[in-house]
Image (cartoon, rainbow, N blue to C red):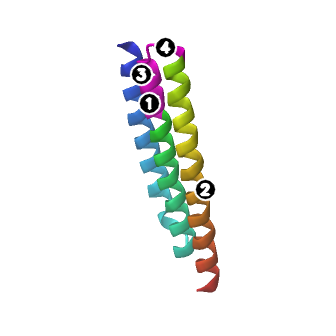
C-alpha cells in the first residue's frame, strides 16, 4: 500500500513540476516555445509511462510477469521515443523555415 501512495505522490509531483516548467517557457520566442512545449509534453508522457510501469511492477506475482511487463514497456517506449524524435526534428526544421 505504501508503494502505491508513493507512486501517486511522485505522479502528482511530476505533473506539478512539468506545469511549472511549461509556464516558465512563456518568455521564449514562438518557435522555441513550441519546441520546448513539445519536449515538456513528451517528457510528461514518458514519465507517466515509467510510473505506470512501476505501478504494475509493484503488483507482479512472478519474475516472468515482471520480465514480460518490462519487455512490453521497453518496446513501447522505443517506438514512442522514435516517433517523438521525428516530431521534434520536423518541428525544428519548420521553425528554421519560417
Q: Are marks 3 and 2 in contact (CB under 8 Å)?
A: no
Q: Nearer the viewer, mark 4 or mark 2?
A: 4
- Bounds of the magenta span? 51-63
Q: Which residue is mark 2?
A: 82
Residue found 58% across the figure and 52% down from its top: 81
Residue found 51% across the figure and 53% down from its top: 42
Q: Is residue 9 above or below residue 32?
A: above
Identify the mark nearer the N-term, 4 or 1: 1
- How far apart are the two marked residues, 3 and 2, measured between alpha carbons? 30 Å
The crowd level at tag 1 (other Cα within 10 Å; few <14, some 14-19, many 20+) is: some
Q: Nearer the viewer, mark 4 or mark 1?
A: 4
**Residue at disc 4, secondary structure:** loop
Q: Nearer the viewer, mark 3 or mark 2?
A: 2
- How far apart are the two marked residues, 4 and 3, measured between alpha carbons? 22 Å
Disc on res. 6: 3
Q: Nearer the viewer, mark 4 or mark 3?
A: 4
- Residue 90 quadrant: bottom right
Amino acid at each position: 500500500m505504501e508503494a502505491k501512495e508513493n507512486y501517486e505522490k511522485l505522479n502528482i509531483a511530476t505533473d506539478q513540476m512539468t506545469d511549472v516548467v511549461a509556464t516558465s517557457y512563456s518568455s521564449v520566442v514562438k518557435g522555441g516555445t513550441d519546441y520546448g512545449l513539445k519536449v515538456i509534453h513528451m517528457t510528461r508522457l514518458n514519465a507517466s509511462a515509467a510510473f505506470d510501469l512501476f505501478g504494475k511492477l509493484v503488483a507482479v506475482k512472478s519474475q516472468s510477469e515482471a520480465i514480460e511487463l518490462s519487455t512490453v514497456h521497453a518496446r513501447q517506449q522505443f517506438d514512442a521515443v522514435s516517433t517523438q524524435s521525428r516530431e521534434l526534428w520536423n518541428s525544428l526544421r519548420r521553425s528554421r523555415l519560417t
